[in-house]
Image (cartoon, rainbow, N blue to C red):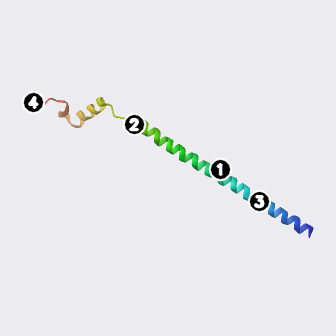
Amino acid sequence: MFIGSKIWDVVIGVNLTSSLAATEEARRLIDLQRSAKHQCMQRQTNKKDETGPVPLALLWNWSKKVWPSAGQVPQS
């Protein structure tokens, strides 16, 4: 009976240890997922800030390339 009791204690101890390790691993993976999501959202926010308004001079140059007559004064 004593040997069976010790074996049972070892089995329970191993199960609890592996369960605790799995829980810690799951927590670590959840933290990694949250961190990656936060970094992705931060990058998207930064991209929005980088674009900003288009300078008028740049828009004017672009319009002259698209419509060559845009920079000319109409002849009457």
- Dividing the picture into quadrants, the one containing residue 16 is bottom right
Badge 4 crowding class, 10 Å Cα cut-off, few under 14, some 14 to 19, many 20 or more, is few
Relative vertical location of residue 54 with respect to residue 13 in this rendering, above or below:
above
User: Disc number at residue 45?
Assistant: none
User: Disc number at residue 75?
Assistant: 4
Residue identified by numbered label 3: 16
- Dividing the picture into quadrants, the one containing residue 26 is bottom right
Badge 2 crowding class, 10 Å Cα cut-off, few under 14, some 14 to 19, many 20 or more, is few
Q: Earlier in the sequence, mark 2 or mark 1?
A: 1
For the C terminus, the image quarter is top left
In three-dimensional space, the C-alpha distance between marks 2 and 1, rounded to whole angstroms, equals 35 Å
**Residue 60 in picture, x, y percent from top left:** 26, 31
* Amino acid on which the number 2 mark rests in the picture: Thr
In the image: residue 62, left or right of residue 28 = left
Q: Residue at x 84, y 66 (%)?
A: 8
* Amino acid on which the number 1 mark rests in the picture: Arg
Q: Secondary structure at mark 3?
A: helix
**Residue 22 in picture, x, y percent from top left:** 70, 56
Q: Nearer the viewer, residue 55 or 71?
A: 55
Q: Earlier in the sequence, mark 4 or mark 2?
A: 2
**Residue 58 in picture, x, y percent from top left:** 30, 31
Q: Residue at x 73, y 59 (%)?
A: 19
Q: Secondary structure at mark 1?
A: helix
Residue at the extreme bottom:
1
In three-dimensional space, the C-alpha distance between marks 3 and 1, rounded to whole angstroms, equals 18 Å
Residue identified by numbered label 2: 51
Q: Earlier in the sequence, mark 3 or mark 1?
A: 3
Residue identified by numbered label 1: 28
In three-dimensional space, the C-alpha distance between marks 4 and 2, rounded to whole angstroms, equals 37 Å
